[in-house]
Image (cartoon, helix red, strand yellow):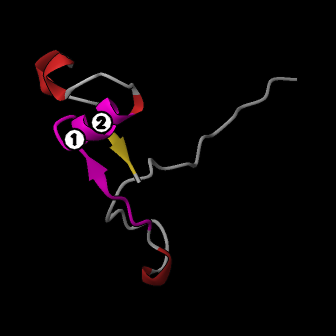
Amino acid sequence: MARNFIDLSVALESDIQSDPDIMLPEIEYFSHKDTADQMAGFFPGLSVDDLPNGEGWAREK
């Protein structure tokens, strides 16, 4: 017997109309430049100048 799967999920994005307004996802985005200081702090002796293009991780919260 063949089965079909239908993916009803939606990508989690800021301001996506996926739920009632009170339950909308709130995502804060951080660019590579935003996190350079934070990334350097994870590695003793590393400075932002040591990172490629002075950039860290891009991330979301």
Residue 57 appears in the picture as rendered? no
Residue 27 in picture, x, y percent from top left: 37, 59
Circle 2/circle 1 CB separation < 8 Å: yes
Mark 1, residue position: 31
Residue 5: % across, % down = 69, 35
What whole-number distance in Å separates the C-alpha atoms at marks 2 and 1? 5 Å
Going by the image, does 36 lie left or right of 19? left
- Range covered by the magenta-colored residues: 25-41
Q: Residue at x 71, y 32 (%)?
A: 4
The residue tagged 2 is 58
- Image position, residue 8 (x, y; %): 58, 49
Q: Which is more toward the observer, 15 or 33?
A: 33
Q: Which residue sits furthest right?
A: 1
Residue 6 within the segment the image draws in magenta: no
Q: In the image, residue 21 lies at what x, y percent?
A: 42, 81
The answer to whether 6 appears left or right of 18 in the picture is right
Quadrant of the image occupied by residue 33: top left
**Of the residues shown, which amino acid type is indicated by label 2?**
Ala
Graded by Cα atoms within 10 Å as few (under 14), some (14 to 19) or many (20 or more), the crowding at tag 2 reads few
